[in-house]
Image (tube, rainbow, N blue to C red):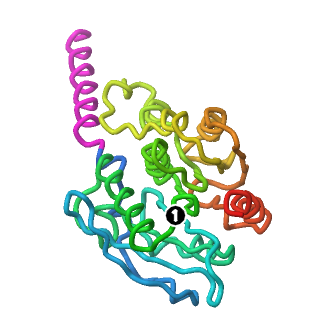
């Protein structure tokens, strides 16, 4: 009976490993949590242009471009990559914050999110970021040195990869990583300590590895109370980043602690961006 129980336990364990290996995309990408598109920048008094961006592999991305304040030329552009769940319609507070800073914003939904076509994947999100960068520099005419890459959670990994790709050709004004993980295998190993996650992980998003290739100013924003991506991830990212760099510690859980929530946090971010975009 002992050996029979051991065999059953082993089969269950192997089954869980197989499930983790083959369904990890559904565990990591959560576009279906809320696909509602009930809000837009006009609801908070901001003018915007709805866009459809074409990717190199034929997908169509839903996007918004928000210019700077009326009668004032934007001092730069924020290329914003949002977190895992929801879509661009759920990021209006960020858009208001950037607008108040005198910055234009280009925000996209990854493939499979919101009204964008396709299904999400790691390589797919990188292609999505490339399409956004191309639109920002070519169609909108912003030079690389006037563009800030801002990534929230999963979007931080996407933004860091984009910055690393550009490192040998262009230098963006800055990279901001808000509540971002060091890598998917690192985070998965903490969430599932009894499974060999590092061997099973097909999706990697190695933000930590990308940082050593990036030579623009970097700000890392993280909460010590983050209940999904531990504070230590932010600390490790900051330690790995090249100077000039800055760390902004905020408060609140992963889905409550946002830089726009407190005026003092916004001021720190604004001061950092003023240095990057004089």
Residue 250's image quarter? bottom right
Residue 229's x, y, as percent? 55, 44
Q: Is residue 48 magenta?
A: no
What residue is drawn where x is 58% and y is 63%? Answer: 146
Residue 81's x, y, as percent? 47, 60
Residue 260's x, y, as percent? 67, 67
Span of residues in magenta: 1-24
Secondary structure, mark 1, is loop
Look at the picture and state if 91 lies above or below 245. Answer: below
Look at the picture and state if 163 lies above or below 54. Answer: above
In the shown orientation, is residue 248 left or right of residue 78? right
Q: Is residue 13 magenta?
A: yes
What residue is drawn where x is 35% and y is 71%? Answer: 35
- Please state, as top left, top right, bottom left or bottom right, where the N terminus lies in the image: top left
Residue that carries the numbered disc 1 in the rendered image:
143
Determine the main secondary structure of the stretch shown in magenta.
helix
In the shown orientation, is residue 100 left or right of residue 42? right
What residue is drawn where x is 27% and y is 21%? Answer: 9
Between 207 and 222, the one nearer to me in the picture: 207
What residue is drawn where x is 65% and y is 84%? Answer: 72
Between 220 and 226, the one nearer to me in the picture: 220
């Amino acid at each position: 009976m002992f050996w029979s129980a051991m065999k059953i336990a082993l089969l269950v364990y192997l089954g869980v490993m197989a499930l983790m290996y083959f369904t990890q995309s559904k565990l990591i990408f959560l576009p279906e949590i809320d696909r509602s598109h009930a809000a837009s920048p006009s609801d908070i008094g901001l003018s915007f242009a709805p866009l459809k961006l074409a990717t190199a592999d034929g997908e169509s991305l839903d996007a918004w471009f928000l210019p700077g304040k009326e009668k004032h030329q934007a001092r730069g552009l924020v290329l914003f990559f949002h977190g895992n769940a929801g879509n661009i319609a759920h990021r209006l507070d960020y858009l208001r914050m950037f607008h108040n800073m005198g910055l234009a914003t280009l925000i996209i939904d990854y493939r499979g999110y919101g009204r964008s076509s396709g299904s999400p994947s790691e390589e797919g999100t990188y292609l999505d970021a490339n399409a956004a960068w191309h639109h920002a520099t070519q169609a909108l005419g912003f030079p690389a040195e006037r563009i800030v890459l801002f990534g929230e959670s999963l979007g931080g990994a996407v933004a860091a990869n984009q910055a690393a790709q550009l490192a040998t050709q262009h230098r963006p004004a800055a990279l901001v990583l808000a509540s971002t993980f060091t890598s998917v295998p690192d985070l998965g190993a903490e969430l599932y300590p009894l499974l060999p996650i590092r061997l099973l992980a097909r999706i990697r998003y190695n933000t930590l590895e990308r940082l050593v290739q990036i030579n623009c100013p970097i700000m890392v924003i993280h909460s010590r109370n983050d209940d999904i991506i531990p504070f230590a991830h932010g600390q490790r990212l900051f330690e790995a980043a090249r100077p000039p760099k800055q760390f902004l510690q905020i408060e609140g859980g992963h889905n409550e602690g946002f830089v726009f929530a407190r005026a003092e946090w916004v001021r720190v971010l604004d001061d950092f961006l003023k240095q990057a975009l004089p």
